[in-house]
Image (cartoon, grey):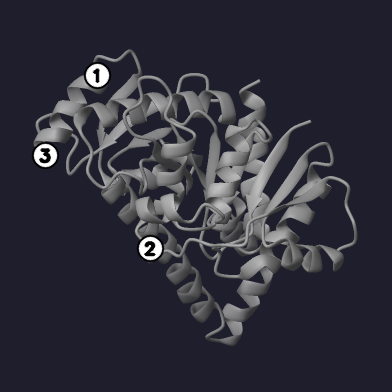
């Protein structure tokens, strides 16, 4: 039976949101087990609000790693933290995946030290599905590696291609490299060298892509370093929220616009859902020997449930 460990510490909304999300996930996937990692008494009190569930158990971890802590030091010193306990639980073969909304740096460092990288992978990459006009594209890396060597870009493209094939059912994923122009000669030294590596790797590499072309969804795997990827991701999140707020203001500005808004209410609700990060839930670290998914720090119950769903889908493709 598939088992996913879920960190209840580190998220902005506390244990209640994680526990509620776990309960919702079990309703969607009644054939899996969830292990909630954190202070047992607190978790048990939250679980009691939802009633007992034989598919949900608790793994005691009294400590938490704060985002302000130095990742390497925290991983080595805080052996009873939820991140360390959860990752060791996977290493021992007790679970097939780990979901956490805690410190990204600590999660990546801990996963690399405890679970190790896949053979041939120099650095794990954080990958997330972003909404586009045609569905979703995979943005890799979006925050794990601020500085990247040319070989990292190649590996990101390979990891992203594998993910889109197995998890999203894309037969021959199109891969593109984020750059300031589509010309092969554009960009930094590292990016230009990465272009050559991707071009000769046997991937469905279509060349460079400018940021303005990303929302069209004509590319399946968008390759960049973690600095650029994180900027793209957070700009898209902020832009979507701002545009929805501006649209709401305009629709409520007069009688006629309110009438039009009422008639198009369903369409606006669908559009909002497409841009809601909670529907995706999290971003997996690709390139590790086991599945680790980083959920958004401000994840609510829906986002946690979606992150667990993503973990289940990914884990089942590895069978």
Question: On the image, numbered disc 1 is attached to which residue?
Answer: 199
Q: Which residue is mark 2?
A: 69
Quarter holding residue 209: top left
Taking the spot 68% from the left edge, 41% from the top edge, the residue there is 4
> Which residue in the structure is indicated by mark 3?
188
Find residue 178 and report its image quarter. Answer: top left
Q: Quadrant of the N terminus?
A: top right
Query: Which numbered marker is on residue 235?
Result: none
Query: 10 Å neighbourhood of mark 3: few (<14), some, or many (≥20)?
Result: few
- The count of marks equals 3
Residue 118 position within the rendered picture, expressed as x and y whole percent measured from the top left: 43, 24
Q: Quadrant of the C terminus?
A: top right
Q: CA distance from mark 1 to mark 2?
A: 40 Å
Mark 1 lies on a secondary structure that is helix
Give the residue drawn at x 44%, y 51%. 75
Percent position of residue 169, x then y: 58, 25
Instruction: Name the quadrant containing residue 292.
Output: top right
Percent x, y for residue 316?
Answer: 67, 27
Task: Say whether marks 1 and 2 touch (CB < 8 Å).
Answer: no
What's the residue at 40%, 47% (across, down)? 215
Q: Considering only vertical position in the picture, is 284 above or below 184? A: below
Q: Residue at x 64, y 59 (%)?
A: 8
Earlier sequence position, callout 3 versus callout 2: 2
Assess whether mark 2 and mark 3 are in contact (beta carbons under 8 angstroms). no
Q: Is residue 97 left or right of residue 241?
A: right
Which secondary structure, mark 3?
A: loop
The first of marks 3 and 1 along the sequence is 3
As drawn, 244 above or below 281 = below
């Amino acid at each position: 039976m598939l088992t996913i460990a879920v960190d209840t510490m580190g998220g902005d909304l506390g244990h209640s949101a994680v526990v509620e999300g776990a309960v919702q996930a079990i309703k969607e996937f009644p054939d899996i087990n969830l292990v909630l990692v954190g202070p047992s008494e607190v978790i048990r009190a939250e679980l009691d609000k939802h009633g007992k569930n034989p598919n949900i158990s608790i793994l005691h971890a009294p400590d938490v790693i704060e985002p302000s802590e130095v990742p390497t030091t925290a991983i080595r010193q805080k052996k009873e933290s939820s991140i360390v306990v959860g990752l060791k639980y996977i290493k021992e073969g007790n679970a097939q995946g780990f979901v956490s909304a805690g410190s990204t740096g600590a999660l990546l460092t801990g996963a690399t030290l405890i679970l190790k990288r896949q053979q041939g992978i120099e650095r794990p990459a954080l990958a997330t599905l972003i909404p586009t006009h045609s569905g979703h594209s995979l943005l890799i890396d979006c925050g794990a590696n601020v500085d990247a060597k040319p070989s990292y870009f190649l590996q990101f493209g390979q990891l992203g291609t594998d993910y889109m094939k197995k998890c999203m059912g894309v037969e021959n994923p199109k891969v593109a490299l984020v750059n300031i122009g589509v010309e092969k000669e554009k960009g930094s030294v590292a990016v230009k060298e990465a272009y050559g590596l991707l071009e000769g790797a046997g991937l469905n590499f279509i060349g460079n892509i400018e940021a303005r072309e990303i929302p069209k969804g004509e590319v399946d795997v968008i390759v960049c370093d973690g600095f650029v990827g994180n900027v793209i991701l957070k700009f898209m999140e902020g832009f979507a929220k701002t545009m929805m707020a501006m649209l709401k203001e305009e629709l409520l500005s007069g009688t006629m616009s309110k009438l039009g808004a009422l008639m198009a209410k369903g369409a606006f609700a669908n559009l909002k859902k497409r841009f809601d990060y909670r529907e995706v839930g999290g971003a997996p670290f690709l390139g590790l020997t086991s599945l680790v998914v980083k959920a958004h720090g401000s994840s609510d119950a829906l986002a946690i449930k979606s992150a667990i769903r993503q973990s289940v889908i990914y884990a089942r493709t590895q069978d």
